[in-house]
Amino acid sequence: MTRVTIRHADGQRDMAAVHRLCWAYRDALIAATTDRPEIVETYYSAKDYGALLMSLPARHARPDGAILVAEHEGQVVACAMLHRIDAGTAEIKRVFVDDAVKGLGIGRQICIAAMDQAKADGYSRMALDTMRPLTPAIRLYESLGFAPCPPFYPPDPEVGDYILFLGRTL
């Protein structure tokens, strides 16, 4: 695995990079869902997504959440975010690795760091949702011990068949 530094995002210093990664994540979702473009529009419309990105520091604030970044060769190249679902469960969200460093094990490293952070914060379980066409991400999550679980929010009936819910004990 490539050596990276994984740390909590440092306010405004890192938020521009986090926003860049999140927009690239949205672009990757668009590319992966060409057969169902309404999925991205339902969950990630450009207008709503921009507002969501501005609210990330509050949505993932300590002590119930976190925004983690991975630095490689001085650049922020990946992000992952945590937030509380309930007293025992944290959700990992917006895991994304820059295309330039994909395949170096950075996604695995930031997911492990997120699980470690959630456990240190007192959570006993971690959950996530992903889209079925994102098979590399699903393989990563499964290799980390995630398995199908019941939905932890009611998915939109129009796109629910496209969403996979995964969870694991920490």
Image (tube, helix red, strand yellow):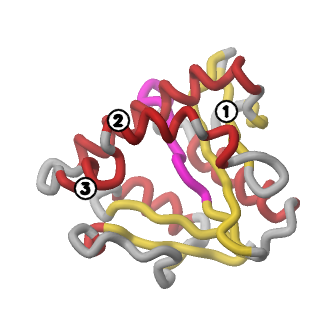
Residue 124 percent across, percent down from the top left: 78, 75
The label nearer to you, 3 versus 1, is: 3
Name the residue rendered at 28%, 58% in the picture: 133
Name the residue rendered at 68%, 26% in the picture: 71
Q: What element carries label 1?
A: strand
Front in this rendered view, residue 131 or 47: 47
The circle drawn on residue 83 is none
Q: In which quarter of the image is residue 115?
A: bottom right
The reply to whether residue 167 is in sight is yes
Front in this rendered view, residue 156 or 120: 156
The circle drawn on residue 47 is 2
Local crowd at mark 3 within 10 Å, few (<14), some, or many (≥20)? many
Type of amino acid under label 2: Lys
Residue 6 placement, left or right of 75: right
Type of amino acid under label 3: Ile
Q: Which sits earlier in the primary sequence, circle 3 or circle 1?
A: 3
Residues at discs 2 and 1 in contact (Cβ within 8 Å): no
Q: What segment carries the magenta color?
A: 92-101
Q: What element carries label 3?
A: helix
Q: Which sits earlier in the primary sequence, circle 3 or circle 2?
A: 3
Q: What element carries label 2?
A: helix
Residues at discs 3 and 2 in contact (Cβ within 8 Å): no
Name the residue rendered at 47%, 79% in the picture: 151
Residue placed under numbered mark 3 in the picture: 39
Residue placed under numbered mark 1 in the picture: 70
Real-space CA distance between mark 3 and mark 1, rounded to the nearest whole angstrom: 28 Å
Residue 140 percent across, percent down from the top left: 50, 58
Type of amino acid under label 1: Ala
Residue 124 placement, left or right of 2: right
Q: Which sits earlier in the primary sequence, circle 2 or circle 1?
A: 2
